[in-house]
């Protein structure tokens, strides 16, 4: 008869809500769940939140410990009466740093996407879908281009809203300023970030957006909506600028500030690279998870 495993680890998504009860009933003593982003929140109605909150509270009763990718996730779950403070540990999602640390502004890659050496490139890496903030960037673009005509917007990613966003860019006469790359293999992302001068992140729902540490590892400063865990890597006036969600006036002001100040971009980017190198390596994530598994396993054996 196969031996019952000592621990079971689930991750994001609604299937994880259902996946934690069977291992508990099978006698698995340690069940860990990583919170990559909230299933509930102000981005949707109270009616939509109600069943998800009920499911999260139920699943928490079958969870030994939670791993939060950002402290913001811990605060949100505790505020929603999901879990207890001692059940949470923050372990940030590590990224393979080397390709981003060596990213550079390759003019051939720029040319591949119709970008010139003189263009000021504002990049965004996100699925083309709701809550990702592409509409806000399109709304801000005319004001940005009035002051910075050489600005181009490099949208990396694909999704069901691509046709809608491309159509809106055409309707606004901005088709020459917006570049849609479509779905890009992960190995090509560092080269695209290297072509950016600034990365903007306008999502209304994200645990800790990986695009932010990726850009900072490449010394590219960031401008981000102050949602969820963004402020834990976009440190205001240290690695980039935080903007209140939906505040297009501030968004325009910060992007123009960075567009017109190359030394500021360099300072924020270098500080961001130091932060990310210290905290976002894959090795650190693995070590932290291993230490947590050992701690939880020892506690389960002591309680047996």
Image (cartoon, rainbow, N blue to C red):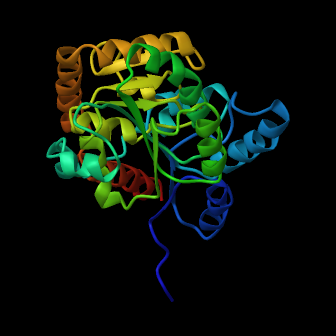
23 left or right of 189? right
What residue is rendered at 27% in x and 48% in y?
111
Q: Is residue 257 above or below residue 126?
A: above
177 with respect to 37 (left or right): left
At 45% from the left and 21% from the top, the residue drawn is 145
Residue 170 or residue 195, whichever sits in front: 170
> In this picture, is 266 found above or below 31?
above
Location of residue 231 in the rendering, given as x and y in whole percent from the top left corner: 42, 23
- Compared to residue 91, the image places residue 147 above or below, namely above
Q: Quadrant of residue 80?
A: top right
Q: Nearer the viewer, residue 239 or 116?
A: 116
Q: Residue at x 50, y 37 (%)?
A: 207
Determine the residue located farthest toward the left in the rendered image: 102
Q: Position of residue 167 (x, y in %)?
A: 64, 43
* Residue located at (27% from left, 33% from top): 216
Viewer can see residue 40? yes
């Amino acid at each position: 008869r196969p031996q019952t495993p000592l621990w079971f680890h689930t991750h994001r998504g609604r299937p994880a809500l259902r996946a934690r009860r069977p291992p508990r009933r099978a006698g698995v003593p340690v069940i860990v769940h990583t919170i990559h982003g909230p299933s509930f929140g102000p981005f949707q109605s109270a009616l939509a939140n109600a069943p998800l909150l009920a499911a999260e509270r139920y699943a928490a009763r079958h969870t030994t410990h939670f791993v939060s990718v950002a402290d913001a996730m811990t605060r949100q779950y505790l505020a929603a009466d999901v879990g207890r403070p001692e059940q949470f540990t923050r372990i940030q999602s590590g990224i393979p740093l080397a390709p981003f640390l060596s990213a550079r502004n390759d003019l051939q890659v720029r040319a591949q996407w119709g970008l010139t050496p003189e263009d000021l490139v504002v990049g965004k890496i996100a699925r083309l879908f709701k809550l990702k903030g592409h509409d806000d960037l399109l709304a801000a673009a005319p004001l940005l281009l009035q002051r910075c005509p050489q600005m181009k917007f490099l949208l990396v990613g694909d999704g069901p809203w691509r046709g809608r966003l491309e159509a809106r860019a055409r309707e606004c006469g901005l088709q020459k300023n917006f570049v849609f790359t479509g779905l890009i293999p992960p190995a090509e992302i560092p080269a695209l970030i290297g072509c950016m001068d600034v990365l903007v992140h306008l999502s209304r729902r994200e645990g800790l957006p990986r695009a932010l540490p990726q850009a900072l590892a490449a010394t590219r400063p960031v401008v981000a909506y102050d949602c969820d865990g963004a402020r834990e890597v976009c440190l205001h006036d240290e690695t980039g600028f935080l903007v209140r969600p939906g505040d297009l006036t501030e968004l325009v002001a910060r992007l123009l500030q960075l567009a017109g100040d190359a030394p500021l971009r360099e300072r924020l980017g270098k500080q961001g690279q130091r932060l990310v190198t210290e905290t976002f390596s894959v090795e650190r994530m693995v070590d932290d998870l291993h230490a947590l598994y050992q701690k939880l396993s020892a506690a389960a054996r002591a309680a047996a």
